[in-house]
Amino acid sequence: MSTPETPRSGAARPRPGALPALLSVHFIGTLGFSIVIPFLVYLVTRLGGNAMIYGALGATYSAFQLVGAPVLGRWSDRFGRRRILLLSQAGTLLAWLLFLLALWLPPTELWRVESGRLGAFVLTVPLAVLFLARTLDGLTGGNISVANAYMADITTEENRSRNFGRMSMASSLGFVLGPALAGLLGSTSAGEIVPVSVAAGISLAALALIYFALPESKPLAEPEIPHGTVRRALGAETKGCYDESTATGWRGALARPGIPLMLGLYFLTFLGFSVFYAAFPIYASTLLGWPVASLGVFFSTMSGMMILVQGPVLSRLSKRFNDTTLIVAGSAILGTNFLLLVLADTRAAYAAAVLFALGNGLMWPSFLSLLSRLAGREMQGTVQGVGSSLGSLASILGLLGGGVLVSRLGPEAFLVAAGAIYVVALIGPRLWGLERRECPAK
């Protein structure tokens, strides 16, 4: 049975069971999210939308996460991870209930568009409620960044890569079961109602798990916030010069050595991912002719392979290679997977899935491990929140552009995703210097 690692000096010691509970939260959160991926593009189309609306629906979450994630990250540094995780998960639960409500509403037409650039679509009442649900989920969508900060609180330096690999593996397991359940449950006469109801139930289970099983890991006690200081409450307070022990807010995060470069790579990585996740369901349903069940099998297979990479494979390699080496190698492999998708062939798509699992499984946990070390203990929530904010900005661009690109360019749209990830591979070697110059976390 897993037990939490001894935290760094000065950090709060979590109660036994913190690490398993945190991994379970990651698994449940990803399961609830991934369960709608296979049928969402079909649902949006049936309710009157098109590829542009599908991308816009995904971008809505990212747009509002751009606002909410940095604030929630900074609040987690001040008020504790557990409280902010509870707030974020409660927002996700309410969002799923709104999503479920949208499925029961009549498709009353609100606005009809016939445009050469935007295409033809109808904005209906259910679609409007779906946008509202994604808005709420985005505003409170700081759970991943806060969970990453929590992991940094309770892990040791020597086990950091392994523990972030465990978190990625838990998320991948959610991606295995989510699409599979969607294909199974979505094939019933009730359609999307059953998987969305399951997603809401999963979010409720995650909320209960955080409340009952996840102890507080807040690493740093700060003084009370004076009344009326709005900028301090939002984490935007600035100092005249940078000092690791006193700098706060996003400017303090950006002043840390190496953080601007890491956040730039964070942006590029999410840009590549979001183009893929927006374009692939449209690509699979139109160019490959896959039904919902086939799309679910594909994502489950890809995620299953990622579990293997993020578990035993990463555990062995992280002992032999540093984080930067794994980031560079993983991003090079990940970019190559997108090139295979240009072939528009089912066998090439599954070959790409193997490379996606290998590249992402090596690169992303190693990236998060290095980011958490460079952030330092007292700035974990802030840095992770700013990273999520930049990831949200990249997702807005990728999700809006991915659907449109694949509709107009076909499989060549994946060249954009490949280009973004290859830039990460080219810039990545600069991180070797950061690892050598890294100051010990306090």
Image (tube, rainbow, N blue to C red):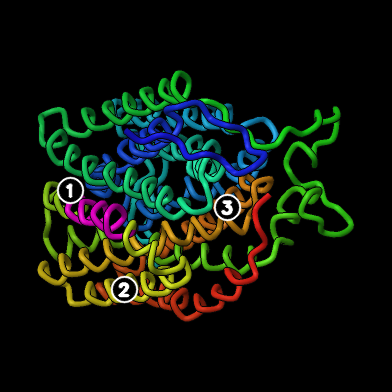
In the image, the segment drawn in magenta is 300-314
The answer to whether residue 82 is above or below residue 377 is above
* Mark 1–mark 3 distance (CA, rounded to whole Å): 29 Å
Secondary structure under tag 3 reads helix
Magenta stretch mostly in which secondary structure? helix
From the viewer's perspective, tell me whether residue 17 is left or right of residue 87.
left
Q: Nearer the viewer, residue 264 or 442?
A: 442
Q: Tag 3: residue type?
A: Ser
Whether residue 432 is visible? yes
Q: Earlier in the sequence, mark 2 or mark 3?
A: 2
Find residue 333 and name its label. 2
Within the image, what quadrant is residue 302 found in? bottom left
Labels 2, 3: front one:
2
Q: Nearer the viewer, residue 166 or 306?
A: 166
Q: Earlier in the sequence, mark 1 or mark 2?
A: 1
Find residue 389 and name its label. 3
Residue 434 location in percent, x, y?
61, 71
* Residue lying at 38% horizontally and 37% vertically, measured from the top left: 23
According to the picture, the residue beneath numbered tag 1 turns out to be: 296
Residue 176 location in percent, x, y?
22, 45
Badge 1 density bin: few <14, some 14–19, many ≥20, Cα 10 Å: many
The answer to whether residue 342 is above or below residue 74 is below
Give yes or no for residue 227 being in the magenta stretch.
no
From the viewer's perspective, tell me whether residue 87 is left or right of residue 118.
right
* Residue lying at 63% horizontally and 55% vertically, measured from the top left: 375
Residue 388 location in percent, x, y?
54, 51
